[in-house]
Structure formats: structure tokens, C-alpha cells
Amino acid sequence: MNNVVRVALLGAPNVGKSTLFNTLVGAHRFVGNWPGKTVDRYEGELEHHGIKIRIVDLPGTYSLSAQSEEEEIARDYIIHEKPDVVVVVVNAIALETTLYLAVQALELTSRIVILVNKIDVAEKMGIHIHIEKLSSLLGVPVVAVSALHRSGLHEAIEAIINVARGTYHVRGPSLSYGIIDYYISHFEKTLESCEASSIFPRRWLALKLVEGDKHIDAIMQEKCPELYSEALKSRKQIMEQFGKSPDLIVASSRYEFISKVIDQVIYKGKLATPPLTEKLDNILLKPLIGQLTLFIILAFLIGLVLTVNTGFPIKQIAEALGLSAVAEFLENYSLSGIVAFAFNVLSEQLRTFLIALQLPDWLISIIVDGAFAGVGAVLSFLPLIFLVFIAFGFLEDTGIMSRLAAVYHETMVKFGLSGKALMPLLLGFGCNVPAVMGTKILSTDREKFLASFLAPLIPCQARLVVLLMLLSLIPNPVIAGLLLLFIYLYSFILVGILGYLISRYMEKTREEPQLIIELPPYHLPSLRVIWWYAWDNTLHFLKKAGIIIFAISTLMSLLLMLGPSGIVSSVEGSYAYSISNLITPILTPIGLDRWEVALSLLSGFLAKESIASTLLIATGKDTPQVALATLNITLPQIVSFMLFINLYTPCVATLSAFYSQVKSAKYTVLLMLTELFLAYVSAFIAFKIFTLLMP
């Protein structure tokens, strides 16, 4: 594909096609006339990542039967001009009727993107559309948009480019015309002998011959009279045999297909009455009461998600209260614990099976400790990701999410974000991966990028585990508590400063992020809709970030397992050890001058919680505390180590999630380098200050 994509914009009247066209191209539009026609021709251009997209706005039409001048223009343009992509706009609140045109377009070409417009209005009416399922059933990309509020446009443009490039495998729907499929297949074969048919899609032309189309009839009567005569006989035979005209059978088949699709992709929820919505808003939209109430709801949901997945923070609270049995139960029966246990069992079974096959030890190690461990790294995130999006789905479906955004907007503006960014950022306390993935709920690309960039600075649970391990070396609990508080406050300050600076850099004149949002009525959450939301987003994570996590996890495992002599029995013979020795001189100015520490930080790139286990491997000790004591780490080194762990390069899963969101290797590297710089400078300053303060 070259750097110009030609797009035909198709849609019925009143679906918002003109609004969408004007929103996309702005002032870059041109008006003329179609050759030999009285209908105006609108064209426009936009540029996206260096690719120029030329859009032709086809006349509004309900079908492609060429019964009117508008229908004839639209159909002829698609057939003869062969645009790179045909974008069909349908109406979210009248999906059943407006999908008919989309189905006709799919009969003509598979290079289609369907935009479900007015999705905001549909949601306000309690109409939920399973976009991913709709896309699967139609076999082409489907994107939910609001032309009026400019939401979903980035995803729409990306889908257009992917279809034009061929990176999205379009296949079209499996649409059957029942009793006349035989005739269509017959003419599809016999049309090979008609040279005039080469300008048309073969199956579509066969369909039109059977169905009956005056324009096609005129062409075939002149160019291929024998086929035309056979088509007339077939139509008569169908009419006599089935008592229905072929065009009626075809139309009925289309509507039957659409009806089956609608049954699978639409759910209509029950809305709260206006008085109830008004009463709830009188509480939730008040500055102080609303903020407190919504924060409690948010904290409860996040706490529930994290507790079910890892036991945190209820496990830690139970330990502090002396409820060891509760803490132990949460640790052993959390989702992540169950997944880890299951994966360990499977890993050992796989190892036993491979040993039984008498494979070499080095190959078994690569398969089990490398590739299989990489799969485990991917799967370990799925329960948390799924639960997070269940929480998101609940907030969206009930109407609470929009209230949350509205109430906290003024606070979040100070960080260059809108109120809607609060939810994904708070998820960072549990795990930065769902925090980054959660930014997809934000309205603009600018805000998605900024929130995704800031989310990894929020101290996640894995980092907290390592921080607590280091704090256990400090005998005074007051100093340890104050130090942990300082680490967290320092992270928040950096988030605020970085958010302000990046947002100011992104906008020459720093405008406050706008929150244009309609507050939908409250309604009871639907388990079906929440499942759609959670499942689709979890699959999105698995497809986009999972492959990268698997690849890098496997690579890191191999570095720890392999050395110049092959499979190593000791970590000191591995490539990871060699790399650690190269890194150690760089870490010396911040007080971390041991290869064991460098190795643990290297493994922390894979997963922050692996820092502790790597220290055990490197020192040969039984507990992290003993391992750290062996290294004779001082208080200035502890503070430096804590700051560096808390700020340096996010784990590979977070980087993968970030890359899948922004689609830019440049910005992914920038994120990694920015956090490395902040970690190094912060650790250096802290180490020097504490060294001076120590007697």
C-alpha cells in the first residue's frame, strides 16, 4: 500500500454520515458534481501518521439496488473506482434497519469497515451493542463511534488503514440465500465464459443475474445474451418452484441473517426512572459528598478485585490484626495463587513427560523453564485483567463511570487529565498492566497517551512486596513506616509534575482537558453486557500484549539459564551474570555496587516480584532478609535501592501493554528511558543525602 488510502463513505440518510465526514476532514473538503448527475459530490482529506486518507462521501442511500440516481452513483463508484476501503455507517439506535445496506455492501466487496454511529445515544437509551461479536459475525472490522462527540474516530481510522494495508484479514459474513444458492453457484461458474463480467465481482454478478437487476440485465443482454436468456429461465423456474420471486427470496435471506445477528449482539437494559436518577445525582454530583461516596465505591471495587486476585490489601490488613488464618487463606486461595499452583503442577508434569521421552536436559530446560514459563507469565495476568474489566463494565453499565469522571474532573485537570482518567490510574496500585489497558476508556488519543505514560509510576503491589522486604532490614518501625510513606508521596509528586510537563509540551498553549460527557440514566447492571466488556478486553490484552510478554519472558529466562558453555548449573555462568557485571559499574554511584543487586534489577524487568527470588538464587540463601544481610546493605543503600525499584523501567508486561496502546516503539523506549532516568537521579540524590546524614 502506498501512502494514500482512497475511502468511500456509504450510509443511509440520517445515520450521521455527513456529520462524520465533516468531523473527519474538517475544512479540507471539496464540492463538485458527479459526472452527468445532478447530485453533489463531496470529497475530503485527512492525514494520519504520515498516511493521507482521501474520503469520497457517497450519496445517502438505503440500498445498492440502483433504483435511484443516488443508489446508482454509490454502487457504480464502488464497482468501477474500486476504493481501497468502503466505510459503511450504520445507526446504533436503528441497527436492524441500517445493517441492510451494510450487508449489500458486503456482497459487493469485503474491503469494508463498519462504523456504528450514535453509540452515545444508544447507551443513553440503555441499548448495548456487542461490537466485537458483531465484527466476528460480519467478518470485517466494526468500530463504535460518536461523530458528534468525536469518540472512536482514532480506532476507526486505524481500522481503515489496517484493511487498506491488508493487515486485517477480512472474510465477509457467511450469508446463505437458501433455496437459490444452487443457482448463484451455477452462474458464478458459467460467468467465466463472459468477458464483460470481469469488471464485476463474480459472485455478486451471479447473485444479480439470479435476483434480477435492470442495469445488469441491460449489460448482459448486450454482451452475453445466452447467459442473460438462461438467467431469465432460472428466475421463472424459481418462481414456479417456490412461489416467490428471486429478489424477494434474496431480500428475505438478508433480513433473516440480520435478525440472527441482532439477537446475538444487542441487549436493552432497564433504565432507572427520572425521579430516581435525579435523587441519586443530588448525592453523587455534589462536590464533597459525591467525591467521598464515589471514592468509597471505587476503593471497594478495586479492593475487591485485588483481594480476589492476590489477597492484597485484605491479606495485609488481616496480618496486621493478627488474623493469620484469614491471611493464609487469602494467600493460598487467591486467583493468582491458584493459577500459580496449577501452573507449577503443569510445569512439573511437562518436565516429567519430557524426561520420559529421554530428551536432553538442556532442551527440557529451554522448553519448561523458558517457553512454558513465558506462557505462564502471560496467563498469570489474565485473571487480574478480566476482573478489572468486570469492574469497569459494572461502572460503565450502571452509569457510575460518567459521574466519577464529572465529579473528579477539576482535580484531575491539574495533572493534565480529565476526571475519567482517575479509575485506570488508581488501578496502578494493584498492577500497572490493567492501569495502562484501562486507559482505552478515555476519549482522546492525547489523554490515552498521557495516562498510559503516567500509570507505570504508580507503585504497584509487586513493588510494594519488594519495598516491604527492604524495610524489614530497618529495626525502627517508625523510620520504616515514614520511609515507605515518603516513597509513595514522592511517586505521586512525580506523577503530578510529569503530567503537567508532558501535557504542556503536547499543547503549545496549555488548555485544560475538556470533559464533554452526557450523564446517562442509571440502570441495573447486566451480567451479559459486563461479560461482553470483560471478555473482549481480556482477549484484546492477550492478542496484543501477550505475544510480546511471552517473547521477552522467554528471552529473560534463557539469559538466566544459558551461558557461553550452554546450560548452566550456577547463575554465575549465565549470560545474565555477564550482563549484570557490565551493569554494576553504572550502579556504583547510587550505592548498588554488587552484581547480585544488578542481577535482581535485571530480573525485575521481567517482573518486579522476581527481585526477591533472584537475590536468593544469587546469594544461595533461604530468605530475602538473610540474602540482603549477606550483602551488608546500609541505610543509604536501602533508600537508594527502594527508590530505584519503585521508579525504574516498568516490567515487560507493562511495557507490552503500553506498546499495544500507543502502537509506537519510539514512545515505548521513551517511557523506559524516562523512568530509568528518574530512578537513577532520584536514587543518586537520596544516596548522597543519606550518606552525608549518617554518622
Image: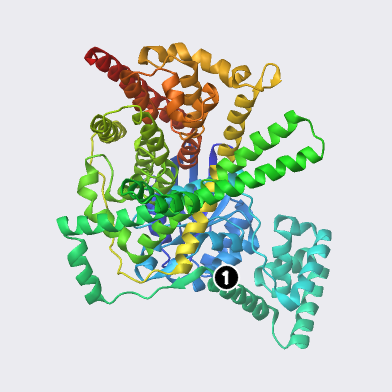
**Rendered residue at 76%/82% (across/down):** 238
Residue 218 drawn above or below residue 682: below
Left or right position of 115 against 277:
right
Residue 532, given in percent of the width and then of the height, sits at 50, 62
Nearest the eye: 176 or 620: 620
**Callout 1 amino acid:** Val
Disc 1 crowd, CA 10 A, few/some/many (<14, 14-19, 20+):
some
Viewport quadrant of the C terminus:
top left
Left or right position of 133 against 475:
right
Residue 120 drawn above or below residue 625: below
**Rendered residue at 21%/62% (across/down):** 284
**Rendered residue at 74%/31% (across/down):** 363
- Judging by the rendered image, the residue that carries numbered circle 1 is 261
Left or right position of 260 against 95:
right
Q: Is residue 426 visible?
A: yes
Left or right position of 165 against 336:
right
Q: Is residue 43 visible?
A: no
